[in-house]
Image (tube, rainbow, N blue to C red):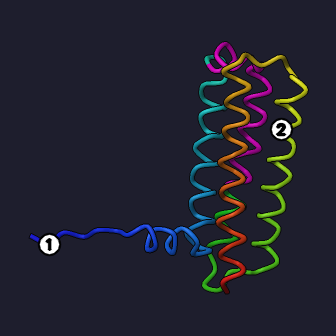
């Protein structure tokens, strides 16, 4: 029996591969968008954000995820397009923090925690992507 172990250095190297970082961003963002569209009316009670807002954001996220996937698809990834993904992620993080701090749409405590948590995840994607771009 062969056992394969991934060291933290190997994991970091894998995650900071640009294609992997963009893929992870696209998949997680797309799943988040699908959840907002499919379960907006359930999530609005939990998050305190209106279902209509969640659905609109969900549609946006699905479109954004498809765009990020398109950036990572060519054999050679366009550096300017990859940097645009990093910039868009930074804008999303800033916007999310504004929403959380301002209490826009009066989210519940869980909703505020969710907004900040997803901002942290998006910031991590941006960091992985920028690290990968610097390594190239």
Q: Nearer the viewer, residue 1 or 77?
A: 1
Q: Residue 59, position in %: x, y?
A: 73, 40
Label 1, on which residue?
2
Name the residue beneath numbered marker 2: 97
Instruction: Identify the residue at image location x=73%, y=16%.
Output: 108
Is 120 located above or below residue 20 in the figure?
Answer: above
Q: What stretch of residues is rendered in magenta?
A: 43-65
Residue 53, percent from left and from top: 80, 27
Left or right: 132 in relation to 97: left
Report which quarter residue 22 is drawn in: bottom right
The magenta stretch spans residue 47: yes
User: The C terminus lies in which quarter of the figure?
Assistant: bottom right
Q: Residue furthest front?
A: 8
The picture places residue 12, in percent across and down from the top left corner, at 51, 69
Callout 1 crowding tier (Cα within 10 Å): few <14, some 14–19, many ≥20: few
Is 133 situated left or right of 87 in this image? Answer: left
Kindly state the secondary structure of the residue where label 2 is placed. Answer: helix
Residue drawn at x 64%, y 64% is 69
Residue depicted at 73% across the width and 33% down the height:
115
Residue 115 belongs to the span the image colors magenta: no
Q: Residue furthest top?
A: 45
Could you say which quadrant of the image residue 7 lies in?
A: bottom left
- The majority secondary structure of the magenta stretch comes to helix
CA gap between label 2 and label 1 equals 46 Å
Give coordinates of residue 1: x percent, y percent: 8, 70
Q: For the residue labelled by badge 1, is the local secondary structure a helix, a strand or a loop?
A: loop
In the displayed structure, 58 sits above or below 42; it is: below
At x 76%, y 80%, the residue is 79
Comes first in the chain, label 2 or label 1 = 1
Sort mark 2 into few (<14), some (14-19) or many (20+) by Cα contacts within 10 Å. Answer: some
């Amino acid at each position: 029996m062969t056992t394969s172990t991934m060291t933290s250095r190997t994991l970091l190297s894998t995650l900071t591969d640009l294609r992997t970082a963009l893929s992870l961003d696209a998949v997680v963002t797309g799943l988040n968008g699908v959840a907002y569209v499919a379960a907006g009316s359930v999530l609005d009670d939990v998050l305190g954000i209106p279902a209509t807002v969640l659905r609109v954001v969900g549609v946006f996220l699905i479109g954004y995820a498809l765009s990020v996937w398109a950036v990572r698809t060519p054999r050679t990834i366009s550096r300017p397009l990859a940097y645009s993904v990093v910039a868009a992620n930074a804008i999303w993080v800033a916007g999310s923090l504004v929403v959380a701090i301002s209490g826009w749409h009066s989210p519940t405590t869980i909703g505020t925690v969710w907004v900040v948590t997803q901002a942290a995840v998006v910031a991590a994607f941006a960091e992985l992507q920028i690290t990968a771009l610097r390594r190239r």
